[in-house]
Image (cartoon, rainbow, N blue to C red):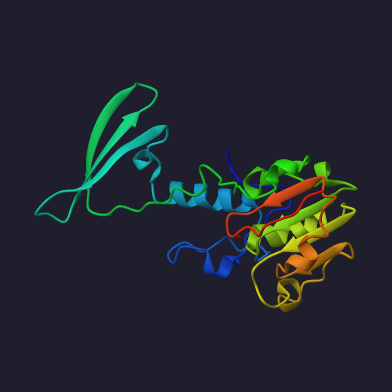
Amino acid sequence: HSSIYEGLVTNLPKEVMAFLDYPYNESVEESFMTPDTVFSYLNSYTDAFQLRNHIKLEHQVIRVCPLPKTDTWEIIVKDLPSDCMKKYIFDYVFVCNGISSPWLPKFEGQKNFKGHSMHSHEYRNTSPFEHEKVLVIGSGPSALDIVLQVGKVAKHVFWVHKIKEAYGVDMMMKMPECVVETSGKNSLIEKIILLSLHLSFKSYQMHKFQWS
């Protein structure tokens, strides 16, 4: 499923996200847009350049192979509705697979943790985190979003990452009062022993946590 969650906006402004030959409509006032605004733009672009007939949905890519002595690629796909295999020849190939199988790390002492672990890919809204102690691991855009959102409803949020300086301060973000930010020193991590929720992020190499 999609990684879109409540309150999500783009982390790049529309001024640098538009195709050069098709700017966003002037009616779009905000620079950082919601998923619905981006989706509407992509649909509009598709229709403006008559691309819809060239888009193959419900097709599984089976093989991508460069053809010898040519500058072309052979693509084998499976048409899922008809269960038929098809072959195409292309000049260029872009691989844009996004996140399909989020990776949750294994670490020492994990079996002692009785709370819930999840990847940010599974995050949808703040409701499961109300009045809870939450550990957020990572420093990417999704981690920052989730810290700011969950920090408004959680009892405590411990935000651990590998960046030497305080990421939230450096980004001039006003953190909720319950958020504690650290670069990952074990002296602080060891205090996080009462967590009932744990969010882990692929960008972070796990320290050796100690759970009570």
Q: Residue furthest top?
A: 82
Left or right: where does residue 76 sit relative to residue 29? left
Examine the rendering and report whether any part of residue 27 can be seen.
Answer: no
Residue at 44% across, 67% down: 20
Q: Residue furthest left?
A: 69
Q: Measured from the top left, where is residue 7 in percent x and y?
A: 73, 52
Camera-nearest residue between 12 and 136: 136
Query: In this rendering, is residue 140 above or below 211?
Result: below
Camera-nearest residue between 124 and 9: 124
Q: How many marks?
A: 0
Camera-nearest residue between 91 and 161: 161
Examine the rendering and report whether any part of residue 161 can be seen.
Answer: yes
Q: Measured from the top left, where is residue 184 in percent x and y?
A: 71, 67
Residue at 51% across, 43% down: 100
Q: Quadrant of residue 52?
A: top left
Q: Quadrant of the N terminus?
A: top right
Left or right: where does residue 55 sit relative to residue 104? left
Query: In this rendering, is residue 174 above or below 74?
Result: below
Q: Measured from the top left, where is residue 125 in percent x and y?
A: 76, 45
Left or right: where does residue 7 sit relative to residue 41? right
Q: Measured from the top left, where is residue 50 in percent x and y?
A: 38, 46
Residue at 38% across, 41% down: 55
Q: Quadrant of residue 115?
A: top right
